[in-house]
Structures are given as C-alpha cells and as structure tokens.
Amino acid sequence: MPIYKVILLAIVQGLAELLPVSSSAHVVVAERLMGLDPSLPQMTLLLVMLHTGTMFAVIAYFWKQWRQSYFASADAFKRVAVRLAHATALTGVFGYALIKAIEMTAFKGHSKAEIEMLFGRLDLIAPALACAGIMILFAGLREPKKDAATTAYTATTSLTRRPTDSVTMRQAGWIGLAQALALPFRGLSRSGATISVGMLAGATKQRAERFSFALAVIITPAAIVRETVRVLHQTRDAAAAGVPSNLHDTVAKSLLGAAFSFLAGLVALRWLSNWLENGRWYLFGIYCLLASAAVFYLHARGF
C-alpha cells in the first residue's frame, strides 16, 4: 500500500475516532474509495496500529484533567474506579450478548462467522450513522435546559452532598450500555453514543466527556488484542494458501500511521472539547445525518 494512503487513513481515523462521527464508517468509506480491501490482514494490522495511536492521544490530552479529578485523592480514585468497572462490566456482558445474537441471526449455519464480516457493509453503516446523529442532536438540543437545571440543583445541594468530579453510578451504567450498543454497529459512534447518553442521563457535558474517554482507554487495549489475534490468524491462513503477506513492510507503514493518527487525535479532541464547551454538540448530529445520506448514496452507486 502506498505511504500516502496510509497517512490519509491515519488522519481520517485519528479525526473520526475521537469526534462523535464514527471512525469505522469513515475509514470503511475511505478504503472503498481508494480501492482497498478492509478484510486483508495488512488492513487489519494497520487499523490496530491506528487505534493504538488514538488511544495514546486520549491519554496525552486528558491526563492533566484525570490527574486533577480522578487522581486528586484516594477517595476520588476509588469512586471513579468503581464507576469505570461498573460501566465496563455492562459493556462486556451486554456487548458480547449482542454480538453473539447478531452472529447467530445473520450467519445462521456458519460456525466460523464473525461480526467483523458485516463491518464493511455500507447499507448497515448508513442507518447506524443516522441513529448516532439523532442521538447526538437530541442530547445537544436538550443541553441548555439540562445544564441550567443541573447548575441550580448543584447550588441547592452543595451543603448536603459530598462533591464529586465523576458521573454517578446510574450515569456510568447508562454510558456502559451505550458503549455496548456501539460495539457491533459500525457507524454508531462510540464517543457520540456514550457522551450523548451521559448528558441525557443528567451528567454535565464535561464529566460525560471525561468519563467516556477514560472508559475508552480501558476497552481499547482489549479491542487491540482481539484484532491482533485476528491479524495473526489471517496471516497464518494467507501463508498456508501461498499468499505473501509482506509483514515487515506492513508493520513499518502501520507505525507511521499510528504516529499520524496520534497527531490527528489531539486535533480532534481539542475540536470536540471546544464544541462541547460552546454548546455546539448538536452540530455533530447534523453532520452524522448528512454523512448517513452520503453513505446511502455510495451504497446505491455500488461501492
């Protein structure tokens, strides 16, 4: 694969992964437009490395905020750790059950079928993008009223409740369930779903954003390990079939891609935080709806 395509995919992944617009949808469309096959082991390895780059971008960007809030004291760390564990457990249980239910329904009679076989279908990505857009739009339009109510509630209860800089257990649970829903559906943005659901559950937008990306840092390594195992299996099967994999060249280009996705991720997070702070969250929803229409069009054109 030419280096310029690797860099282009890295920028698309880095921006879209951390903005609430679904990186998988944008990467799949970009791969189709560039004539690349997402199912090849080389493409899977590249995607793993791009996810790694964006994960380190999240850590670099949010580390100061996490240190001032989640690591401010032993008590603060305990509270957020319990909430992260709660949300992650819900993601694991419900996400796994949802994936297996889809595999059993969509691939009935195929014992080795995997959910990833559906990830490149534009006819599935388009409605998922539309769902994400509606969710973000709804949360964004409700935001001013909710924030005013939250501010008033905080002012009247500050003397009777212990302050916290994290989401509540109930809000963490809803965020975990939203993340589970995003796992099998490419086009349903993980960050868009989790932040929007957190806001709709009553969390302030800053807390929902901070908790959502802390949760991403926990789940991303598991996803990277899973994809790495798939790469190894695909490479082994390709070698058995006599297909050259050129693994060393792919690894070198993937590392370059990870560096570009890291830089693009930092830009995306700055953009995201700015729009959240200035009440522009709903604009991401409008974009997702427009992107959904564009993906429907590409599908109708045979891409």
Image: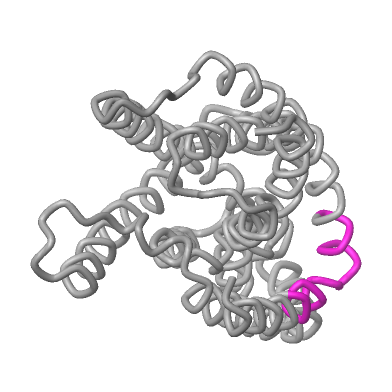
Front position in the image: 242 or 3: 242
Question: What residue occupies the far front of the structure in this picture?
Answer: 242
Name the colour scheme: one colour
Magenta residues? Answer: 273-287
Q: Quadrant of the N terminus?
A: top right
Q: Position of residue 138 (x, y in %)?
A: 67, 85
Asked where in the image residue 105 lies, by quadrant, the reply is bottom left
Give the side of residue 37 with respect to residue 269, left or right.
left
Q: Residue at x 52, y 49 (%)?
A: 37
Q: Residue at x 72, y 63 (%)?
A: 205
Front position in the image: 127 or 191: 127
Q: Reply yes or no: does residue 269 show up in magenta.
A: no
Q: Is residue 278 visible?
A: yes
Q: Residue at x 28, y 62 (%)?
A: 99
Q: Position of residue 232 (x, y in %)?
A: 33, 26
Give the side of residue 151 with respect to residue 298, left or right.
right
Q: Reply yes or no: does residue 277 show up in magenta.
A: yes
Up-down relation of residue 127 to residue 13 (above or below) = below
Up-down relation of residue 54 to residue 30 (above or below) = above
Front position in the image: 19 or 92: 19
Q: Residue at x 32, y 31 (%)?
A: 238
Up-down relation of residue 19 to residue 146 (above or below) = above
